[in-house]
Amino acid sequence: MGLLYSLLVGGVAGWLAGKMMKGGGFGIILNIILGLIGGIVAGWLFKELNINWFNGINSILADILKGAIGASVVLFVANLFKK
């Protein structure tokens, strides 16, 4: 169940990041991977910056938001190297 949850949240987060950033994403598989990596990046980034915005929010919503923010950061960095 944990793997299915991670794939679902990663997919939604990757899709959301693709919509927020220019380009619209990379397809379902890469969006899932991007969302999973984004969740890891956001977890690390929020911990380093001591940001605790998502403490009172429903767990799945918080995971999706953190994943989307992290995936957007990953997309931004990837676009810097792409040019």
Image (cartoon, rainbow, N blue to C red):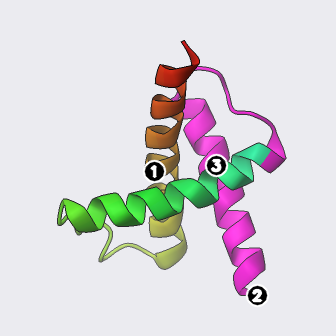
Crowd band around label 3 with a 10 angstrom C-alpha radius: few (<14), some (14–19), many (20+):
many
- Which of these two is toward me, 81 or 69? 81
Q: Is residue 44 left or right of residue 13?
A: left
As for residue 21 lying within the magenta part, the answer is: yes
Q: Is residue 23 left or right of residue 39?
A: right
Mark 1 or mark 2, earlier in chain: 2
Q: Percent from the top left, x then y, of residue 9?
A: 65, 64
Start and end of the magenta stretch?
1-29
Mark 1 or mark 3, earlier in chain: 3
Give, as a three-letter code, the residue at label 3: Leu
CA–CA distance in space, label 2 to label 3: 20 Å
Q: Disc 2 on helix, strand or loop?
A: loop
Whether residue 53 is visible: no
Q: Could you say which disc has been placed on residue 34 in the image?
A: 3
Q: Could you say which disc has been placed on residue 1 in the image?
A: 2
The residue lying at 19 percent from left, 59 percent from top is 49
**Badge nearest the viewer, 2 or 3:** 3
